[in-house]
Image (cartoon, rainbow, N blue to C red):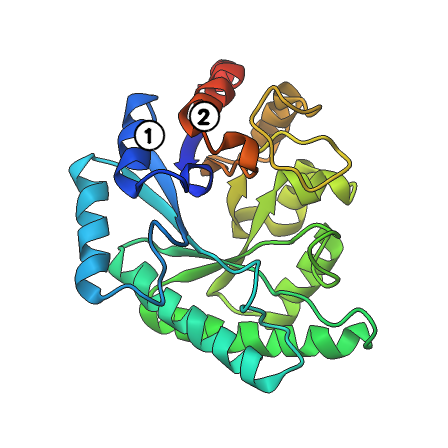
Amino acid sequence: MAKIANMNFHYQRYPLDYFLDSTVKVGLNAVELWGGAPHFYAEDATHEEVKAVLKEIRRRELELVCFTPEQCIYPINLSAKNDVLRARSIEYFKKCISVASSLETSLLLVTVGYGFYNEPAEEAWARGRDSLQILAEEAGKAGVVLALEPMSRFGSNLITSLDTLSRMHKEVNSPHMQVLLDTIPMMLSGDSIEAYGETFGDELAHIHFLDGDGKTSSHLAWGQGVFSPEAFAESLKAIHYEKYLTLELIGPQYNWDPEQATIDSLARLAFMR
């Protein structure tokens, strides 16, 4: 039986309480918290506000499986060439590590960002690796594990495939950094769940489980794309994956009725539950 978590990204036009109540309403018992305004932005959050969010999650008897701070848009980039921007990004993630610890979740999602497309890729790679090594050390002190997520080729020129993810995982070489599989970049790069399982084993910390069109980075509700959840389910069984699968739906088409998109996805995945 799959363990499925709801995520609040597609609920961002509603209050955080609405998302938490909706998660309970649709029959799920776990959430992945996207850390972005207007719900919960780490840079703005006081210690009291962090504890208040945790209290609301606990009040509904929900499990927080991962904290995913907003990081894919300006001004966060761990591989930035500009020293001020990169330093700011590192400090931002240090704050997020502290927040994750205060939220009493052990998993923090991180992406390496990107380099300029007209500079040698190895220069940006080295900056990203150095940033991750700094953060992995910080995470270890806080009892937090970084979950390194690849992006699609539409969002990055660094970690966009199993091969590049594996290379960075080896070079950072820290027990405090594991990896995350997202079905969208996985399919775009021609990789597979079995290959992730073979490469990383128990170091595969988490999965973002989405339907997609196989051509773009669209993160779709299940039943709206071309992926086969039945095939994915067989693959998950083959690698003995028993951790959470998060519904990370992304797109303005979900703004008006995010709950229905979650319900539709769960209906398509009913055979897994």
CA separation, marks 1 and 2?
Answer: 9 Å
Which amino acid, mark 2?
A: Thr
Q: Residue at the location (57% across, 23% down)?
A: 222
Residue 221 % position (x, y): 56, 27
Q: Is residue 235 above or below residue 96?
A: above
Do the numbered discs 1 and 2 sit on residues whose CB atoms are within 8 Å? yes
Label 2 crowd bin: few (<14), some (14–19), many (20+), radius 10 Å: many
Q: What residue is pinned by disc 2?
A: 262
Q: Quadrant of residue 144?
A: bottom left
Residue 233 % position (x, y): 59, 24
Which amino acid, mark 1?
A: Thr
Left/right of residue 156 with respect to residue 240 in the rendered view:
right
Report how many numbered discs are placed on residues in the image: 2
Label 1 crowd bin: few (<14), some (14–19), many (20+), radius 10 Å: many
Q: Is residue 209 visible?
A: no
Q: What residue is pinned by disc 1?
A: 23
* Front-lying residue, 63 or 196: 63
Q: Residue at the location (72% across, 54% down)?
A: 160
Secondary structure under tag 1 reads helix
Residue 201 % position (x, y): 58, 47
Q: Return the disc, 1 or 2, that comes first in the chain's sequence.
A: 1
Q: Residue at the location (65% across, 71% down)?
A: 171
Secondary structure under tag 2 reads helix
Residue 156 % position (x, y): 70, 59
Left/right of residue 264 with respect to residue 19 in the rendered view:
right
* Front-lying residue, 75 or 141: 75
